[in-house]
Image: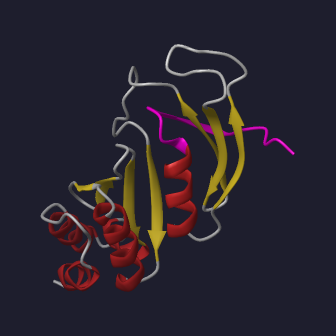
Amino acid sequence: MISKNTICIWYERDALEAAQFYAKTFPNSAVGAVHRAPGDFPSGKEGSILTVEFTVMGIPCVGLNGGPAIKHTEAFSFQVATEDQAETDRLWDAIVGNGGQESACGWCKDKWGLSWQISPRVLIEAVTDSDKAAAKRAFEAMMTMKKIDIAAIEKARRG
C-alpha cells in the first residue's frame, strides 16, 4: 500500500546504493520496490533505475535518480534520537566512515550529501532543561562538538 505522505529524496544516480546503506545502518529500515524508467529521461535511459522505495526508521521514502541538477542542503535532515553513546558512535561512524563528513553540533552528511542529526536523547533533555543555567551550559558544550559526547553534555549540565 502506498503511503499517503512519502519523503522524496533526489539523488544524482545512487538512490539504490543509498537505500541499501540506510537499510543496513538504521533499525526498522528496508529497501522496497525498485522502478526502472519506461523511457529515456534527461538524466538517464530507458531501463535505468528511476526510483527506489525504501523506509528509514519506519519513515516511507522514495529515492529519485534525477541527475546532477539538484543538490542536498541542510534545509532537510533526518534527526535520529539515540539512546546512549554506543548508538551515537555507531550511527555517526557509519555515516562519516562511508564517505560522509562531519559537521557541527551532532550534524553530519552522508556520502550523497544528505544531512543527519545524530542527537542523543540526553542532549535534547539537557538543552531544554527547565533550569535555564543548566540548559545554557549544555548548549554551550554542544556548540563546541561535532559528534555529541554524552558524558561532556551531562557534566556541563551539572555545572
* Quadrant showing the N terminus: top right
- Location of residue 122 by image quarter: bottom left
In the rendered image, residue 9 lying in the magenta stretch gets the answer yes
Which is more toward the observer, 84 or 70? 70
Q: Which color scheme is applied?
A: secondary structure
Residue at position x 29%, y 66% from top? 97
> Percent from the top left, x then y, of residue 153?
24, 78
User: Residue 105 appears in which quarter of the rendering?
Assistant: bottom left
What number of labels is visible?
0
From what the image shows, is residue 128 above or below residue 9? below
Is 65 magenta? The answer is no
Q: In terms of secondary structure, what is the magenta stretch mainly?
A: loop
* Residue bounds of the magenta highlight: 1-15
Q: Is residue 117 left or right of residue 47?
A: left
Question: Which residue appears at 22% of the width and 71% of the height?
Answer: 138
Q: Name the quarter where the C terminus is drawn.
A: bottom left
Q: Residue at x 38, y 44 (%)?
A: 112
Q: Locate residue 3 relative to residue 10 in the image: left or right.
A: right
Could you tell me residue 12's position as x and y percent?
44, 32
Q: Nearer the viewer, residue 46 or 30?
A: 46
* Residue lying furthest left: 144
Q: Is residue 135 left or right of residue 110?
A: left
- Give the image location of residue 144, x and y in percent: 12, 64
Residue 71 image point, x, y percent: 36, 29
